[in-house]
Amino acid sequence: MALFDQRGQHVNTQYNAQQMNFGAVENSIDLVAELEKLKEEVARARTNGLLDKKQATDADYQITKAAQEAEEAKPNKKTMLDHLSSAKAIIEGVSAAGGLVTALTAAIEAVQKMFS
């Protein structure tokens, strides 16, 4: 379990995405399933007001493109990493959505490990 030192943070609402396990990803099917869960978490963050409509739409699009690439017969690692990094950049500026950033970081690490 990851521990985070949150001393000094002043956040009214903290959102922690908890339903994904990118560490258990062993193949493209697993990756796509976890990315779909991530998209659900982005939608939930939007519903809860932690992401605005534009941020949620843009992040969802980037995650969708990464998932579509993972479904290809020969997925392009760089393309997936680019899309996931873009989604992460969109969400990084939202301090209350730190759990989503952590999940995106785990997704990026899973892609790097799987397609090395």
Image (tube, rainbow, N blue to C red):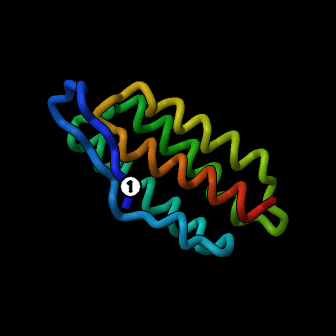
Residue 93 location (% of width, % of height): 41, 25
User: Percent position (x, y) of residue 101?
Assistant: 45, 42
Q: In front here: 41 or 26?
A: 26
Query: In the orientation shown, which residue stands out farthest toward the right?
Result: 74
Could you say which quadrant of the image residue 2 lies in?
bottom left
Quadrant containing the N terminus in the rendered view: bottom left
Left or right relative to 98: residue 92: right
Residue at image point 20% right, 24% down: 10
Q: Position of residue 115 (x, y in %)?
A: 78, 61
Please name the residue shown 49% across and 30% down the image. Answer: 90
Q: Which residue is mark 1?
A: 2
Q: Residue at x 42, y 63 (%)?
A: 20
Residue at figure coordinates x 48%, y 61% from the top left: 36
Quarter-of-image position of residue 51: top left
**Image quadrant where residue 91 sits:** top left
Image quarter of the C terminus: bottom right
Q: Is residue 3 above or below residue 72?
A: above
